[in-house]
Structure formats: C-alpha cells, structure tokens
Amino acid sequence: MKTLPFVIFLIAAIAQWAAPLSQIWSREQTLSKGTLIQVKCVAPDPYDPLRGRYLAVRPEQDDVTVADGMELVYGQSVYAKLTTDENGLATVSSISATPPASGDFIKVIAAYQSKGKSSFEWPFNRYYINEKLAPEADKWFAENIRNSKGIVAEVRVLDGRAVLEDLSVDGKRLHEILKERVK
Amino acid sequence: MRTSHQRWLLEQIPQWERDGLVTADSSVALQERYAIDDSQPGLAQMVMGALGALLIGSGLIAVIGYNWDDFSRPIRLLFAFLPLLGTQIFSFWVLRRGESLVAWVRETAGLLQALATGACIALVSQIYHIGGEWPDFLFCWMLLSLPLTWVLRSHAVAIFYLIAIAVWSISTQSAEYGKLWYDSPMLYPLLLLGLLPFWPSWPCKAPLSIFMRWVMTISAIFGLFSAAFFACVKELGYGGAWWICAVSAAIIALFPLNPSGIAEPTERKPQVLLGALWLLGYGIAITFRSVGDDLFKGISHTSNTPWCLGLLAVLAALGFMAIKHWRWGVLAIASIALLPLVAFPFAQGDGAFYSTALSWLATLHLATTGLTMIVPEFLGRRGAPRLGATLLSVLTIARMADSHFSLLTKGIAFIAVGVTFLAFNVSSSRKGRHPQSSQS
C-alpha cells in the first residue's frame, strides 16, 4: 500500500478542519474577551447563494483623514483607531500602518485616497439572518432607516480583529425585535 | 481513439475473426491494443456520480442557507463539521480500497468531500457573520479541495477546481477589487500548476479525457486573459491587454506535448485549436490600422512589465521546444503574437504611432500562412487547404474593408474572392472523392 496518498489525504483533511477552526478560535476569543463597540450604520438586504440571506452592514463612516505624507495603496491593510462619542457610538479617528499603542483599534482595508482623506472598508459587512425572518427584516429596515437613532452594529473588538455580534435599534437587539414581529 | 469507438471495435473484432477478415493473432493484438482502461471513469458514470454528490452537497448548502438560528452556536457548528467528518471517513475508506473500487465511487467520494468542505466554511462564515466577498470564499474552498484531485484522482473535483480558478481569476481582474499580488489573477498559473498530475504532457498512465482537456483549455484561456487585463495599464486603453492575451494564446497553443500527443489529430488538442483560432482572429484584427494604433499605445507601456516579460520568456522556451519537435504549423501561427513587437521599432513617430508597418506585416504573415496550408495539398503532402482558403478569403475581405477603394471595386473583389473560394471548395471535394472512385 502506497503511503504518500494517505499522507496527502491526512494533511488535506487536517487543513479542511484547521481552516474553519482557526476562524472559530479567533472569533470566539474576540467575542469572549473583546470590547463591545457600537457603530452607526445602514443595512439593506441582499442574498448570498452560498451562505444564505444577510443584511449588508454598511457603517455610516467610510473615510478618515490621513496624516500628512502618509501614502496608502488600494487594498492595503491598516490599523484604525476607534474613538467613542458621547452617545456611545464608535468612529475611526485615525489610521496608521502599525497598531496604535493604546485604545481600541481594528484592521481595515484602505481604498481610495484623495484630498487628505482615505476611504476604507470595515472588517465586517454582513449580518446573516434566518430565511424566515429575512422578509420581516426588510420591513423593519424600511421603517427604521430614517429613525434618528438609526441602526447600530454591535461589534466585539480585540487585537485588531472585529466580530459583528448583533444589530440593534434604540438598544433593542434585531433578533429579539424580529422574533416578536413574526409571532 | 474515443472509448465509444474502442467499444465498437472490440465488439466487431470477434465477428471479423469468424468471418475470416482477421487472423486469431491479429484479433488478439487488436484487442490488446484497443483495450479499454476501466480505471478511468466513463462519462456517464462520472456524470451520474457527480450529479448525486452535487445534489447532496447542494442540499447541504441550501439547508445551511436557511440559517438555523434557533439552535445554539455549538450545535450549529456540529452541523457544519459532521458532514465533513462523514465524507472524510468515506474518502478514507475509498482510498484504502484503492483500485478495487469502481471509478465512479472515487469520483463521488471526492466531490462529496469537496462540497462538505465548502458547506462547512460557509456555515462557519454564517455563524460568525464573517464578511468578505464570494471570491474569497471560493478561493479558500478550491484550495482546500485541490488535494482530493491528487489522492482520489477525482476528475469531478479537478473540473470543479478548473472552473473555480477561472471564475476566481475573472472576478479578481477588475482594479476595484484589489491590487495586491495575492489578490489578483496573476496567481492563476500557480493555481493551474496545482493540477500538474492532470496536465496533458505529464507522464501519467492514462491519457487525459477530451472533456478534461477542453475544460482545462477553457479555464486557462479565461485565467490567463484575466491576468492580461489585470496586468495592463488600463488608462491607456485595452490594446496592451489584447496583445498580452495574444501572447497567452500562443503559450496555450504551444503547450508542450509528448510524441503521442503531437501525433493526435487537432480536434483532440483543444489548446492548439482554440489558441490557433484566437491568434488567427487577432492576426486579422491587427491588419486594421485603427487597431494597431491602440495596440502600440498599450505595448509601449506594458511590454516591460514583469508579467509581460515573464510571458515572453515562457513563450521563448515553448517556442524552442516546438522547434525541437518540428511543430512548424503551430509555431507559425503562434508567431502572430510577436508581430506587434517586430513592427514596434518601425511604428514610432513624433508623438504618435504609424500602424501601416504592422498592417502590412500581419497581412503578409497571414497570407503566407494561408498559402502554406494550401500548397502541401498540391504537392501530395498533408495540409489544411480549406482552413488556408478560409484564412485567405477572410484576410482579403478585411483588407478590402479597410481600404479606400470605391464600393464598386470592393464589391467586385468580394465576388471574385467568393467565386474563387467556391471553386476551390469544389476542386478540393472532387480531389477528396477521386481516390475512392479509383479504388471502387
């Protein structure tokens, strides 16, 4: 019996477990030990044929002032320092190539740079939702998008990683709201 | 020879032996020569096995898509990993049984495991609301599935992989997606390298099926062309990108083959067929001066990029191998890709390009190629007279369309070409029928 195919198979099988397990590990760490921040956002409702229905989470802030002389490449990974305002909502106050010495920060992807500002992509952009609840989420979104308090993404942050925990309006979590609405 | 033809032949040989058409020794020799390799799955078996696995896998993904948020996170994670574990155990069992199992079981095991892997990472993404676009997901999935093609020799997974790398390359070629080297279709050749055991010229026991060859060629065309568009300087138009596509097509056409591969008919070599067709079309296009202007603008900026230099180096190496194997026909067609480079020094003017040199060069090259395809037929050697005549006709039509002649002159020229083409076709048909009538 040839050994090499079994060795390759074993490595492949381990890799097939390791890839999702590493994602699980880093996200569980963030969820259990991370700081909770709230980001104001908008959320329309698309569909991913492979991963199901989700709300596309788009934080309101999509650009930040960059320091003089800082040149960013499209797609470059940078560190965004987070600041919380008086309403408890977090915004990105600055970006840097290295992790900030103090405070909460997340890794973001730099996009276009123009006139001293750079647009960036947040590390979370979708909130998966049950197929049965998705139509109700559509209606809820339409009703609340003009709400002065807006939709808030509750995100756990740890060592630059961010995990979207839930969406909420006026302190009430989306999941609970939807469950009540479909009853 | 196709398996269906082999089966027909094997059915006929005993009858021929009984009828005294072949001797017993010849019959045995023929049966041994055209024996069907059962280690390779038949198309029907492969399709049925793949379809079953696809249905199960798609069902699994659809069930996951429902998003069972009534269950706790650990339970949902169990849903993700149990099918993966089940399919891994099944694949391991198949691997242990080795050659004693019928081929379609191996195919089904490979595809099921690949789909369970995809379902698992999809469910984990869903549970933790992991962002990212679908090409990222596809990239991770296809890399995790690749080893299954090596160990299980699964054609279905190899086909999935070939389609996935092509789709991924196309999806990452737009500048908006990312400019990082690992986030670009320039990775395509490396990804294709992953299927080395399936490459046509790779020393393997069984020849690659025609279907696999077609999928591989089409995947390579999409992958390399995506890389060409990614590598070019888009602000200067797409002339440079189309030229890099032509160089890529020449590489595809010149892909090295072993002696038995070279001896096979062209219809069994899709890389030669599609590569040559693309290059001939490109050759006709660059006879137009307006195309040439755009092309030179692009070439002046893209010819010294690392991607382009790399492609030219590969083309030179493959050209050398083609010379070694006397593949003059393919080499002549592949050289069309280099015509813009040859004409480039003569085309530069005061801040502009003059494409007349390229137009004449391409016309001359294609006319020579067309004639070279026809002439051997009249010298009693094997040629491609109809393809040559078609090429000459299309070339004449293109040149006339681009000229400043009056409509009357163009019309008369078109009629003359049409009549010549039909006359040639009739003459070829008669010539083809002649040997049969003399034999009868």
Image (cartoon, coloured by chain):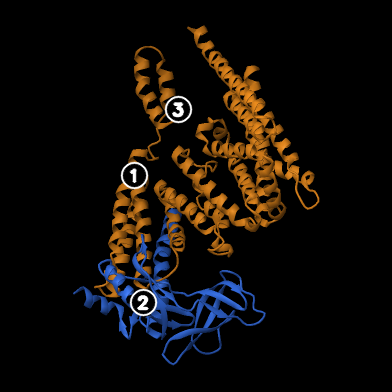
Chain colours: A blue, B orange
Which amino acid type corresponds to the residue marked 2 in the rendered image? Ile
Q: Quadrant of residue B9?
A: top left
User: Separation of disc 3 and disc 1 at Cα?
Assistant: 24 Å
Residue position for label 3: B33
User: Separation of disc 1 and disc 2 at Cα?
Assistant: 53 Å
Label 1 residue SS: helix
Contact, mark 2 vs mark 3 (Cβ under 8 Å): no
Label 3 residue SS: helix
Query: Image point 68% across, 52% down: which residue?
Result: B298
Identify the chain of the residue marked 2, using the numbered disc in the image.
A
x, y (%) of residue B2? 43, 31
Q: Quadrant of residue B119?
A: bottom left
Can you say whether A142 is above or below B373 in the image?
Answer: below
Mark sitting on residue B66: none
Residue position for label 2: A145
Identify the chain of the residue marked 1, using the numbered disc in the image.
B
Query: Image point 69% across, 34% down: which residue?
Result: B403
Query: Image point 68% across, 54% down: which residue?
Result: B302
Residue B372 visible = no
Residue B272 visible = yes
Q: Earlier in the sequence, mark 3 or mark 1?
A: 3
x, y (%) of residue A87? 41, 90
x, y (%) of residue B424? 59, 18
Can you say whether B416 is above or below B218 in the image?
Answer: above
Mark sitting on residue B104: 1
**In this view, the mark in front (2 or 3):** 2
Contact, mark 3 vs mark 1 (Cβ under 8 Å): no
Locate the N terminus of chain B by quadrant: top left
Identify the chain of the residue marked 3, using the numbered disc in the image.
B
